[in-house]
Image (tube, grey):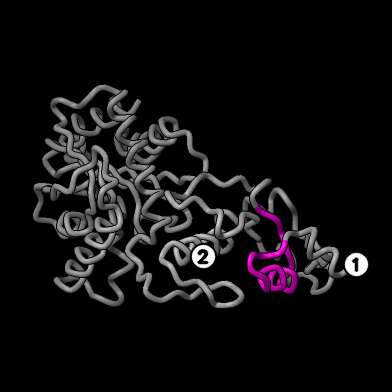
């Protein structure tokens, strides 16, 4: 599936770019079938899959296919993600751990300052994976293009692997590399990505989080609770009534309270895997709480269980 997908894009893209974009079969394939190839290969339901073939009905110089974790991004314009990037001449495709470009535009513009910031963030990401790269390399990527997007991709590249499209590896090798890269991606999310860990917006009840490990665990915990993607799945499973006090926002506030409840991650911070972010189960790893109960749960260290808080208000 992966081999066939990468090969078809590499073989046909050069010719397709000379044709009308609208209703082009290769454009349709990249938009719909290519992300599905990643999804079916990985079979990891917490990831999102996307692709890019061109903005506003124009062919892109650098087509791409990406896997994204909703804890750090739901779009290739923000955060960081795993992506296949094709060189403009289609001779090479890279599997890249990549920092997004668009989100930096407002602060850094579109020129050298943004490129420098991309390179800085990619360097931080590399440093957090030092010693754990496996078969991935730190080799710079060359997309063989003078386009601005290509230059930004080259600066935002943290690590990856290069494939010559004329001699792509077998399906098993491509799949193994992709799975390895996704595990590396999960590890990076746990370790903070490009973020500054010298200060933390989220600490425990007694503000005693001191070690980098604890800061990472706390940030991951709050990311899980605040993630819109996870919250939507949690609410679909558990509903919108507080599992401690039975408070229903819609009953009290009417229409403006409809669909409102907070997702609470049940796994204590200290027990979060210090290696990487694992797949979370909305049914077993989360509860739904009203704002007051959610705040009270976190007043102790470690946080109270749902049953413990229920006993306090009986």
Residue 108 image position (x, y, % from top left): 24, 75
Boundaries of the magenta span: 286-304
In primary-sequence order, the first of circles 1 and 2 is 2
Badge 2 marks a residue whose secondary structure is helix
Name the quadrant containing residue 157. bottom left
Alpha-carbon distance for marks 1 and 2?
A: 30 Å
Q: Quadrant of the C terminus?
A: bottom right
Q: Residues within 10 Å of mark 1 (few under 14, many from 20)?
A: few
Instruction: Identify the residue at image location x=15%, y=58%.
Output: 151
Instruction: Identify the residue at image location x=65%, y=60%.
Output: 263
Q: Is residue 248 left or right of residue 283?
A: right
Who is closer to the viewer here, 86 or 11? Answer: 86
Q: Return the mark for residue 314.
A: 1
Residue 167, compared with residue 132, is above or below; it is above
Q: Return the mark for residue 189.
A: none
Residue 74 image position (x, y, % from top left): 44, 55
Q: Return the mark for residue 218.
A: 2
């Amino acid at each position: 599936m992966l081999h066939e997908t990468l090969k078809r894009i590499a073989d046909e893209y050069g010719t397709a770019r000379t044709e009308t974009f609208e209703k082009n079969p290769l454009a349709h394939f990249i938009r719909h079938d290519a992300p599905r190839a990643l999804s079916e290969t990985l079979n990891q339901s917490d990831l999102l899959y996307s692709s890019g073939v061109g903005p506003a009905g124009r062919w892109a110089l650098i087509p791409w296919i990406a896997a994204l974790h909703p804890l750090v991004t739901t779009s290739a314009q923000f955060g960081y993600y795993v992506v296949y990037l094709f060189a403009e001449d289609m001779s090479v495709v890279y599997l890249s751990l990549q920092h997004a470009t668009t989100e930096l535009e407002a602060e850094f513009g579109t020129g050298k300052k943004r490129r420098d910031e991309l390179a800085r963030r990619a360097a931080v990401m590399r440093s957090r994976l030092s010693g754990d790269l496996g078969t991935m390399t730190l080799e710079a990527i060359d997309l063989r293009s003078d386009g601005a997007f290509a230059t930004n991709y080259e600066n935002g590249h943290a690590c990856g692997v290069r494939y010559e499209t004329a001699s792509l590896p077998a399906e098993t090798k491509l799949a193994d590399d992709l799975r390895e890269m996704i595990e590396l991606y999960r590890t990076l999310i746990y370790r903070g990505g490009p973020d500054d860990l010298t200060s933390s917006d989220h600490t425990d009840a007694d503000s005693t989080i001191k070690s980098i490990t604890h800061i990472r665990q706390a940030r991951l915990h709050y990311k899980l609770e605040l993630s819109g993607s996870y919250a939507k799945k949690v609410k679909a499973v558990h509903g919108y009534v507080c599992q401690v006090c039975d408070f229903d926002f819609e009953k009290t506030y009417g229409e403006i309270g409809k669909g409102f409840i907070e997702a609470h991650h049940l796994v204590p911070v200290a027990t979060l895997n210090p290696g990487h972010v694992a797949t979370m189960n909305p049914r077993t790893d989360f509860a739904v709480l009203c704002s007051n109960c959610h705040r009270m749960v976190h007043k102790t260290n470690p946080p109270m269980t749902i049953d413990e808080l229920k006993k306090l208000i009986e």
